[in-house]
Image (tube, grey):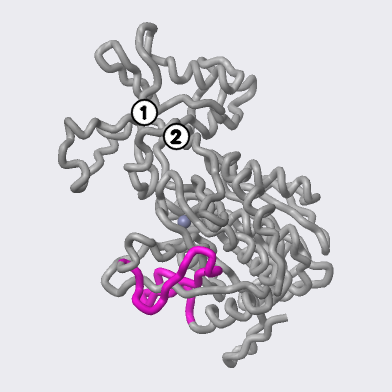
Amino acid sequence: MKQFAFEEINRELLTFLDESPSSFHAVENMKTMLEKAGFTRLYEGQRWKLASGGSYYVTRNDSALIAFKVPKADFAGFQVMASHSDSPVLKIKANAEIEVEKQYVKLNVEQYGGMLCAPWMDRPLSVAGRIVVRTADGVATKLVYADRDLLIIPNLAIHMNRKVNEGYAFNVQKDMEPLFCGSGQDAKGSFLKFIAAEAGVRAEDILDTDLFLCSRMKGTVLGLNGEFIASNHLDDLQCAFASLKGLLAAEPRDSVAVHCVLDNEEVGSGTKQGAASTFLKDVLHRINSAMGRSEEDFLTAVASSFMVSADNAHGIHPNHADVADPTNRPYLNGGIVIKYSANQKYTTDAISGAVFKTMCDRAEVPYQIFHNRSDILGGSTLGNISGTQVAFNTVDIGLPQLAMHSIYETAGSKDTAYLIEAAKVLFSSSVQGDGDGSYRLN
Ligand code: ZN
């Protein structure tokens, strides 16, 4: 029986999640891990010189990241795992302060992505993201995280909302504005002044912001025997973390191993750093030409590539076991979930499913199957969107979790380790088709 370092992996995962209150912070933390492992940073705005056997990474918008290892010999294709850095969240608008009867100051927010609203209430929150400040010759970006309990969105007492437990329609503009401070001083500009002090800049130098609310609740291991983990951002930083750990441990032989974390999946992926953008295609093209290969070499490599689109999946809910497919029942700790959808919301087909099952077998990790109940519309993910830019043989997978898009989600304490092992196999192998329906996994 294969041994897994579950406890150590969960400790590292939960620290990564706690330290990633925004997608910008998640990318920053991945950069730190890559630098520590000796990866060389590349910039999209500079020429690339790559060497066989080298390890590199590049970011776009500081919220998407692609890291890759070039094998020592010439390569046949690309082995890609793609995940996403963003989660549904409340974003703070410009001119955020709203004064209430000269007693309170609350912040004006808007919704990013399809969140569960209720879990945001009655818990300590703070602010994380980036600001852009004036410099002598232009502008510069600074990451910000106010590492303290700062904000709260208080529920309305049941006495004024007697029917709340029979179902409530949340209005983000009315219900979701966090309480920031009492009044007394000039409310206008007080939030930016606070952010400026946190960032060590002058408030008048802040030209613009991308700031989001974030949870202050730390990740934890729970269950009688430590069966479960709970944290913010499990969708999809759990997959991004496993993919990165897999890349760090992998030794690619015949293919370039590519860890790809894209942004804005929760709002349709249609940004310059999202799955619908050219980011992945541009990077793969540049790897190909930097290694002195032709466009024909690039196209044959794409045809000899395999992609795993890794985005968390729904496990069977203990209180709602009936909303899942009757014969395909993914459970927490049951292993990696392979997702299928007849109308191709997921990219998995019989070939990519079979190839990925073979990889799991080689990694000695369990896998399970997800279909939507045929009368319930499921979500979508990044695999088929990315395929419109660079079309690989692709499988859609994820780790089973509960409460997807809550501010605090629950998953199994074993599944991350399984995905790390599968990622190692993906990144160390290559998938060659003969064009006649047979595929060789080297
Ligand atoms: Zn997701």
Q: Secondary structure at mark 1?
A: loop
Image coordinates of residue 20 in percent, x first then y, are: 57, 41
Q: Is residue 59 above or below residue 134?
A: below
Image coordinates of residue 347 in percent, x first then y, are: 47, 72
Q: Which residue is mark 2?
A: 213
Name the amino acid, label 1: Pro
Image coordinates of residue 55 in percent, x first then y, are: 77, 56
Quadrant assignment, res 434 = bottom right
Name the amino acid, label 2: Leu
Residue 324 within the magenta-colored segment of the rendering: yes
Query: Going 66% across and 75% down the picture, which residue do you hit?
Result: 364
User: Which stretch appears magenta?
Assistant: 323-349
Q: Is residue 425 visible in this depiction of the protein? A: yes
Query: Going 47% across and 20% down the picture, which residue do you hit?
Result: 192
Residue 238 within the magenta-colored segment of the rendering: no
The N terminus sits in image quarter: bottom right
Q: Which residue is mark 1?
A: 178
Q: Is residue 114 left or right of residue 204?
A: left
Give yes or no for contact between labels 1 and 2 (Cβ–Cβ under 8 Å): yes
Q: Magenta stretch: dominant SS?
A: loop
Query: Going 43% across and 57% down the picture, which residue do you hit?
Result: 402
Q: Residue furthest front?
A: 224
Distance of mark 1 from mark 2, alpha carbons? Answer: 9 Å
